[in-house]
Amino acid sequence: MVEEDAAPVVAPPGAVPPLPDPAPATGRRTPRGARFAGAAEDVGEERARSRAVAVGVAERTDVVRAVEALARLRNEGRSGEAHALLVEAASWAPARFPLLAHELERAGLGADWQTLLWEAASLPAGQLVAAADALVAAGRADDGQQILRQGVARPPGEVGQAVLGLVAEGRRREVRALLDAYVRARTPEEAARSAEPDPQHLVPLLLEAAQAVSDERRWDLLHALRVAGFAA
């Protein structure tokens, strides 16, 4: 675990610090042979734990430095540069989102956290769902739901294409999460239009997602699909 009172690294004034280079691999050799099997497992577990701690430290350092830079830009009235920093942070690894939320709110930059969520809503579908998952896992379910609702506000055709991309990658859980948010947030008519890129595959997925919400939502979507000319 990362100590909460670890001293943050302060970036030079006016600069957004670059991401640190990965730590070099060590030259430690793993014992070989049957009698060393247990030792090899211990070494592997030790290395895995070390990597996890190292990644956590690097992520926290990057986030703290970025938030400090953002606070400095806000204090200096450099709103354009502050917004650019938020746009960049929105494209970071999903695992950093809970850290960003915590550090921004601790710095009194809650409004910037909301801006970052809005910017992150334009992420590719897979990253969007991963960011929502990370927030929910960190106990920020409202933020996770918000980012999904904002993410499915994109044009219906784009949502359909995004779903097809996730299906092609075999990411069924992400498909369900995205479509669940979609059929809840959009009207049945809007949801029906998202089937246009590939009705054969998208219509059943949309109806399945609507059924998970309620029978009424499924019937409303079914009607909208038929009106739009899609067989269901």
Image (spheres, rainbow, N blue to C red):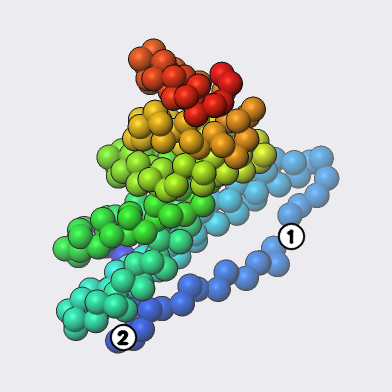
Please, what is the three-letter code of the amino acid marked with disc 2? Gly
In front here: 183 or 168?
Answer: 183
Compared to residue 107, the image places residue 170 above or below, namely: above
- Category of crowding for the residue at label 1, using alpha-carbon neighbours closer than 10 angstroms: few (below 14), some (14–19), many (at least 20): few
Q: What is the spatial separation of the Cα atoms under label 1 and label 2, in whole angstroms?
A: 44 Å
Closer to the eye: label 1 or 2: 2
Report the residue that reaches farthest toward the top. Answer: 215
Place residue 165 in its image quadrant.
Answer: top right
Amino acid at pointer 1: Arg
Viewer-closest of 172 and 134 = 172
- Point out which mark residue 29 bears: 1
Task: Please say if 12 is above or below 92.
Answer: below
Q: Is residue 229 left or right of residue 39?
A: left
Residue at (49% x, 61% y) in the render:
54
Q: Quadrant of the C terminus?
A: top right
Q: Is 115 drawn above or below residue 77 in the view shown?
A: above
Mark 2, residue position: 14
Task: Tell me which label, 1 or 2, sits earlier in the chain.
Answer: 2
Which residue occupies 70% across, 67% down?
27
